[in-house]
Image: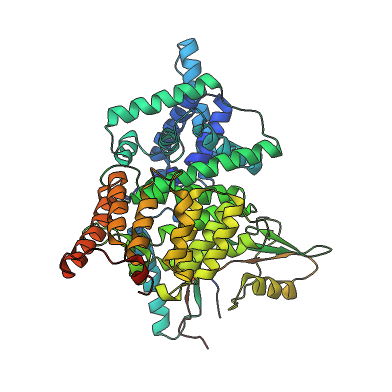
Amino acid sequence: MTDLTWIDEALTAARPQVVGALLRYFRNLDTAEEAFQEACLRALKHWPVNGPPRDPASWLVLVGRNAALDHQRRQSRHEPLPADEFVSDLDDAEADLAERLDSMQYRDDVLRLLFICCHPELPATQQIALALRVVSGLTVKEVARAFLVSEDAMEQRITRAKRRIAATGIPFETPGAAERAERLWTVAAMIYLLFNEGYSASSGTAHIRTPLCDEAIRLARLLLRLFPAEPEIMGLTALLLLQHARTPARLDANGAIVLLEDQDRRLWNREMIAEGLVLVEKALRHGRPGPYQVQAAIAGVHARAARPEDTDWAEIDRLYAVLQQLQPSPVVTLNRAVAVSKIHGPAAALEMIEPLAKPLAGYFHFFGVKGALLMQLGRAEEARIAFDRAIALANTPAEAAHIRMHLDRLAKDSEAQGGAPPPAPGRAGRR
Amino acid sequence: MLYAVLCYNLESVVGAWSKEKDDAVMARHGAVMQKFADRGKLGPVARLMPTTTATTVRAGREPIVIDGPFAETKEQLLGFYIFDCDSLEEAIAAARELLEETGALEIRPVQVFWPGSGVK
């Protein structure tokens, strides 16, 4: 066997569980990570010869734990031990250990590992960076690239974040039900943030960063495997899958944004959509709707429409109404307004978003939607003002370019009319 | 003799495969399928969705519906069906009809389905 990628894949997949278990054992994140590293090195040495162990995670926990203990012993006694002594009888030990490693404990281990990355004092981007490094096992270089900062800067950020976690103390006691639930929501929110960072980058030149989305989906599935009966975790996983399925159609060949209604739906990833829809259905059976489930259901309505005109906007409007109740926010109202514009026309939608002007004064999408509605109403001058504001607030060049396209269209329209003044609102209503 | 071949692997690994890797694996499977199909000896083949999409109907005094895959190791896999259902609810209803006093039925959506060449 010369191709060792299968080992790499197995190590990456086992990482959250193994680092989580080692963290419980050593109560120190750096020790846990080093022990995992050491176990990986030994896996690379032993697995190609002996084949993969039946339970890679248990093997890595055992080897990593022994390696770290050995290291500690050596440091305290200054007497070396034969390095492979305990590796030789691994096969027996493995079966034994696999028996003893309780899956419930693993569950709390992984959850704890994810949870400490969500330290409330850490800014969101640092939480995400830390999770990518510690849980997903991305190298500092890869994380730095994802955030478009230098490797040194990212190294510093991660070190600082870890120091803060160590200073606060890691919660090691087995969580009670309420605490476990709270950890779960915190972690779910972090995974959602990670996805959004990739789905619509908050800064930098790339508008979509697929690796971050892929990683978020991987973590969501991991969480769902640990909590298979949590409808909101089903909803979260479904939401990410349904959104990410559209990625191949969201930018054109030049990297310009393609709006949902203009996307080539044949490019959507059907397998992701199918999996997402199944999860939505499973979640809704519980009759305990939550924000992730409802958002996933909305994404599901879009995914089911073969053509934009097939979209069930009334259902989307109804779902946004539920979301407004569950999680009132100006952004939700803004999104609902888009559905309202499809059902009742742009004037009704504009009226709906009027009260949002203040809370969303710094929000790119508010001015994008407002400009588009005004444009539909033929209020070109007001539309131009809204679009100018949107450009000023754009987070990425692609967002700015997209708005500029609208402005160009407005300019062309007014040229075609021989520079005539913008049409009166009354006339536009009949368009 | 008809044989069923059941595929097992670590989902966390397979789920993280790159598209290239996944395509390469499926190409290998495709070659085997083709070989049997050419001789009219390929039955239906299915690739299942991840276990996160699974629902299990377990026997009890009252059958219970559980989210997630069948996870016990006490029972053995004895057979399988493929139904075309309009909803998960319909699949659950079918499973209830099939359920014995003991045991369980795991319902897993099929991601990709090849009807095969048909077998005699």
When asked about the image quadrant of residue A44, the answer is top left
Residue A360: x percent and y percent? 43, 45
**Where is residue A145, by image quadrant?**
top left
Q: B9 or A368: which is nearer to us?
A: A368
Instruction: State the residue at coordinates (66%, 69%).
Output: B78
Look at the image and tell me whether residue A5 can be seen. no
Q: Residue B29 location, x and y as percent?
A: 40, 69
Judge whether B82 appears above or below B108 on screen: below
What residue lies at 56% left-to-right and 49% top-to-bottom?
A328
Question: From where the camera sits, is residue A203 visible?
Answer: yes
Q: For this view, does A355 lie left or right of residue A285?
A: left
Colour treatment of the image: rainbow
- Is residue A408 toward the left or the right of residue A336 in the image? left
Question: Where A102 sits versus A70, above or below?
Answer: below
Q: Is residue A45 left or right of residue A187?
A: left
Residue B115 position within the rendered picture, expressed as x and y whole percent measured from the top left: 48, 81
